[in-house]
Image (spheres, coloured by chain):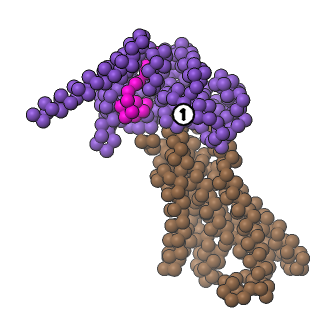
Chain colours: A purple, B brown
Amino acid sequence: MIGLHIDDVSHSFAGRVALDHLTVVIPPGQVTALIGLNGAGKTTAMRTLAGRLHPTAGQVRVLGHDPARLPPRIASRFGHLVDAPLVYPELTVAENLGCAARLHGAVKRDAALMASATVEAMGLASWRHRPARSLSMGNRQRLGIGSATLHRPSALILDEPTSALDPKGVVLVRELIRNLSAEGAAVLVSSHHLDEVARIADEIVVLHDGREIGRLEPGGTDLEQRFFAMVLDADVRATDARGRRRS
Amino acid sequence: MSSVSALAAALSVESLKLRRSLIARVAGLLLIVLVPTVSVGAVALARSPLAVGAASAKLAPYSTGDLVATHLLVCGQVLSIGSLFAAGFVLAWSFGREFESGSAGALFALTVPRATIALAKALVVLAWSGLCVLVTVALTLAASAAVAASAGASFAGAWSGAGIALASGLLGTGLALPFGWLATITRSQLGTVGCLVGVVALTQIVVLLGGGPWFPYAVPSLWTGMGGAASAAAIGLPHLLTAAAVTPVSLFLIVHSWRRLTNV
């Protein structure tokens, strides 16, 4: 079964095209990265996968099911962090993780154990009993990632998971993603950090103006150069096409 | 995961969030402290020579009659509005904050369905407000008993008055539930609070125009005698049931809206 599937999806916001016939297939055990400039459609694609947005056309599937109506047994194998995390500022780190575990289907005793293990795994032990509102941006991001992954999901989407992290946090999240992938999880991440993407992704999909404009091999040292060449080429072709339509 | 265990998990999470909520603490404290104080204080003022002029005219209905029954009459009248405001503010926070902070998006595609989470939110606030109303009436009873004992007054009218005050506060609590739905629709805490204030203002106008008995938001106040004895007598069981019916209808709307939620 395909872990995450975006199948010919298009979506518009008030007439502005956000996604244009996008297709991405992520089998179990694969990490796919979405990269693109701001407004390219990465977050919109992820929102459709989390069931938060019904696409105008096409369909999305998480572990073979419509994410807007996931049966609980399937939802218990799915994790996502897109935009805001499942974190409440008035709750402590341990309480937030305990709540996330309960909402991911754990019974009370298991939730406490999962929360405790995740506090350690995410390097948050010193802040265990501190309210989330007192955390730094980086630690808050660690907490959000912990909340989305503490149930060891089989399908996972993470939007900009390392944007606020220090180098130690980046390594920690990279290892978490690679470990989940090794356990068989299908993972979709978005990032602006091309070096980071090159380290964790098996496949890189380049989005521009809501369209896939190509795929990049993760290896090599010139990823940034190849990315910008691809974006520039797409812009030139789009400008030419508009010119031909006018004439 | 069964529906019952999903609801139990959501109730556990939402009750923890409510216990840590500053707005719930402040609203609960105001209700529990202010209402008994106002209930006993207003009657004492009405029956003292200090009440003169406009205050005397306003407090005139409390200047005669059974002391304890009058304390509980004031308690019921204040609770009819106070519980609506307290529960309304907390519902605006509980539902609206999820959209304003963006955490509503994180509540999608969880093992516990978001409609169950929304139901738990509503039930937790209803239970919290109901408990606050119960404690408020109990404290008013206790304060009234102390005043009555020192004045040598009878305590006979206490229980029926307490029952009406309790029912009035619970009706106010139930009438607040549509504001949880409004917070879902508007996705705004402040917008919802604005609607709450607007509904209270509209209630005054509807009562002035004589439509109060069939306007659910006017029923608890009129029933407890805020519009005078004649208006209170006009409130019967059908009017009370109409006001009470707002609660299950709102619960349905909240669950339905969260089940169909999109573009979050």
Most extreme residue toward the left is: A247
Residue at coordinates 77% horizontally, 85% vertically from top-left?
B50
How far from the left and from the top, in percent, is residue A141?
57, 31
- Left or right: A42, with B9 as reference point: left
Residue at coordinates 54% horizontally, 13% vertically from top-left?
A182
How far from the left and from the top, in percent, is residue B59?
70, 83
Comparing A127 with B98, the one in front is A127
How far from the left and from the top, in percent, is residue A83?
49, 36
Comparing B17 with A201, the one in front is A201
Mark 1 — on which chain does it sit? B
- Left or right: B59, with B94 as reference point: right
Which quarter of the figure is the C terminus of chain A placed in? top left
Comparing B34 with B147, the one in front is B34
Which quarter of the figure is the N terminus of chain A placed in? top left
Determine the image quadrant of residue A190: top left
Residue at coordinates 53% horizontally, 75% vertically from top-left?
B204
- Left or right: A54, with B26 as reference point: left
- Secondary element type, mark 1: loop
Taking the image as drawn, is residue A3 in sight? no
Comparing B24 with B161, the one in front is B24
Is B53 one of the magenta-colored residues?
no
In the depicted structure, whether residue A19 falls above or below residue B134: above
In the depicted structure, whether residue A160 falls above or below residue B128: above
Determine the image quadrant of residue B169: bottom right
Is A42 one of the magenta-colored residues?
yes
Most extreme residue toward the top is: A220
Residue type, numbered disc 1? Leu
The residue under label 1 is B110
The magenta segment: A30-46
